[in-house]
Amino acid sequence: MIDVVGFLISWLTLLGIYAILALTLNFESGTSGVTNFGKVFFYGLGAYVGATLTVYLFLLLNGVDVSKTPPYDVSGIVLLGELAGKNPALNLGLLALSLATAFLVAGVIGYLLSYPIIRVGPAFVGFTLLSTGELFRIFLQHYEPVGGSRGLMSIPGPFSWVPQPRLREVLFLALVLAVLAATYLVMDRLTNSPLGRTLRAVRDDEVAALCMGKHVPKLKATVLFIGSGFSGVAGVLLAYYLTSVNPDMFVPAVTFNVWAMIILGGMGNLRGALLGASIFTFIDRALSFVTPQLGVTVISPDYVRGFAVGLVMVLVLLYRPQGLLPEGRVETVAWEELGGGASG
Amino acid sequence: MLPGYPYSILNFFQYTFFYILFSIPLTLSYRNTKVINFAHANFISYGIYTAVFLNGLLGNTSLALACLAAFAVGGSIALVNHLLVFRPLEKRGASMSLIMIASMGLWIMYNYALYMLADIAHYYTLKNFISYGRIVYADVPEVELLGLRLQQSFVAGGLAALVLVASLYLFLEKTTLGKAMRAVADNPVLAEISGIPRNTIVNLTWLIAGGAAAVGGAIWTSFSGTVTPTSADAMILQVFTVSFIGGLVSLLRTGLGAVAIAFIENVGIAALNTYFGVPISFRPFLTFVTLLTILIAFPPLGAAGGLPFRFRSRKVRAE
C-alpha cells in the first residue's frame, strides 16, 4: 500500500526547501544577472551553521561538557537523542536562533565574497562561487569539530517534543511553508520595487546601468547578501528535516538541480521558480519511492535522473529560453491603477 | 634544498605538463569562439575514459593509440557541442551567460552519460570502471635522468605538452590559417568582413581544443593511481585558474599560469607541510587563494563580459 499522505508530506517539505533556493537563485540570476553557480555553498553553510549551533548549544544548555562528550561522538549522538524531547522551549529557541544566525552568516559571507567578483564577467563570478562550494566541502571533510566526513547526526528538531510522528511532520511542513511564504513575499516585493527594476537594468546591460549612475557593484553585493541569507535559512530547514548533515550532501549537483528548476520554470519569474521546484522535487520523490521496487538494474536510476537534469537545461535553453512561465512585466502601483494589471 | 625534493620538483614538472595540456585548449577555445565552456572538464574525462575503455575492453597497451583515439573522441564531442548547442544559441543572439549556463547543462549530461557507460561496461565485463587503476603502457619508456626515474606519464606528458606548444606556435605564427585564427580572436566581425571563413576557423578551434584536452586526459591514466568519472571535475579549479591567469585570451600567459599553479601546488604545499604541518590535501586552497588574489589584484577587466574598468575613485589632479 502506498502511503499517499506520507508521500505528500515529504514532497511538500522538500519542495518548500528547494523552492526557497529556486526563488533566491531566480532573484540573483534571473532578475539581477549574478551567475551564482555556488548556490550549494550558501545552502551548506546555513545547514552547517544551524546544525553546529543546535547540537553544541543543546548539549551545553543541558549541562553536558562538550569537551568530554562532543556531539559528533557516539556518546554525544546518543545523548542528543535522549534529551531531544525534554524541553520544547529550548528546541524552539534554538530553531529561532539557528535561523537568524544562518541568515546572517550566509548573508555576510555572500556579501564579502562579492568583493573579488563584482568587477569581472559572469564566467569568473560563476566559477569562483562554484569552487568556493567545492573547497567548503573539502574543508568540512577535514574539520573535526563538525564531525569531519561523517558530519553531524541526531540534530534535535524544533518539534521533537511532539509524541506523534505524523503530527511532528505536519508541524515541520507548516514551518517550512511559512518560511517559503515569507521568502516569496520578500522576493515578490523586491522584484517589483525600484530596486528590482534597477537590477533588471544591470542584468540587461551593466555598462549602461553604470552610465545611468547606478552603483553596480553595491547592487550586486546587496543581491548576494539577500539571496545567500535566504539560502542559509533553507539550509537550516534541511538540517532539521534530515536531522543530520554531512559534506557529501552539498555537492555541485545540488546547484545544478536548482538551476534546472529556474530554467525550466522561467528565469525572472517567481511563479516559474515555484513551478520548476515542484516539478523537479516531485520527480525526485517519485523516483525515490519507485527505485526500490525496480530491483537491480544495469544503469542506476540516479544517473538517468542526473542526465535528465542536464538535458532539460540544454533543451529548454535551445527551444524555449523563456521557460514555462516567461518573465512578466514589473508590477508598479501606477500600472495597477491604470487597470493594466488585470489584463496583463 | 627545496622541501619535498625530489618528488615535489618532479611533480611540479609533471603538473606543468598537464596544466598546459588542459588549460591552453580552454584559453584557445574562449578567445576564438567567445564561449565560456564549463563542459571543458568533459573533454578531459572523455579522454581519460577513452584510454580506460580501450585498455579494459580491448586490452590496448599503446599510449600513442589511446592518445589518437582520445583526440578523435574529444574533438568530436567539442564539435558536436558547438554545432548542436552553441551555434544555434549564438545565432539566436543569446547572451554570454546563457551560453555558459547551457555549457553547464552539457557538463552534467556528459558526466552522467559517462557513469552510465561505465555501468554498462561493468555489466558486460564485470570489471570496475567507476574506479580504474593506473594503466601501464608498453610503448612509452621510463627514463633515468640524474639518478631520478621519470615515469611514463612524465615522458609522455612532456612530449605532448611540447608538441602542443610548438605546433600551436608554428600554426598561429607561420601559417595563413593560423593568422586567420588570430584575426578571428582579435575581432570576429572585422575578420568576417575581410573574407575569413569564420565558421571553419571556429570548427577547427573546437576540434583542436577538445582533442588536445582529451589527449591530456589519456596521458593522465598513466599518472593517476585511480581514475573515476569525476577525476577531471576535481581538476577544474586548477585548469580554470590557469586560464584565468591568462585572462582567457593570452596563450603565453596561460602557459606561465600553468607553471605558476603547478609550482604553488607542489612546491608550495610541500613547504607549508614541512614547516607548518599543513595537510597535503589542502593544496586546492592555495590555488583558490591565488584565484581570489588574481581577481582582486589583477581583475581580467573587459574579458568575458566584465566591466571594462576598475572601481577606484581616482581624483583627477589639476595640472
Image (cartoon, coloured by chain):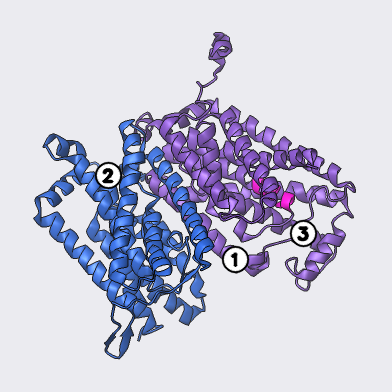
Residue found at x 38% / y 70%: B264
Task: State the image coordinates of residue B129 (x, y, percent, origin top left).
Answer: 49, 65
Output the letter for the chain in purple.
Answer: A
> Is A84 in front, or is B205?
B205
Q: Is residue A136 visible?
A: yes
Residue found at x 53% / y 52%: A252
Task: State the image coordinates of residue B278 (x, y, percent, origin top left).
Answer: 51, 75
Q: Amino acid at mark 1?
A: Gln
The answer for which chain carries disc 2 is B
> Is A332 in front, or is B33?
B33
Start-end of magenta stretch: A233-242
Within-10-Å neighbours for mark 1: few <14, some 14–19, many 20+: some
Eye-nearest disc, 2 or 1: 2
Pointer 3 and pointer 2: residues touching (CB < 8 Å)? Answer: no
Q: Is residue A326 above or below residue B316?
A: above
Report how far apart the C-alphas of labels 2 and 1 lie in the structure: 38 Å
Residue A141 circle label: 1
Output the letter for the chain in blue.
Answer: B
Check disc 2 and report the residue beneath it: B33
Eye-nearest disc, 3 or 2: 2
Q: Is residue B307 visible?
A: no
Within-10-Å neighbours for mark 3: few <14, some 14–19, many 20+: many
Q: Quadrant of the N terminus of chain A?
A: top right
Q: Secondary structure at mark 3?
A: loop
Number of marks = 3
Does the magenta segment cover residue A147?
no
**Side (left or right) of B201 relative to A33:** left
Q: Is residue A165 above or below residue A194?
A: below
Residue A154 circle label: 3
Q: Amino acid at mark 3?
A: Ser
Q: Amino acid at mark 2?
A: Thr
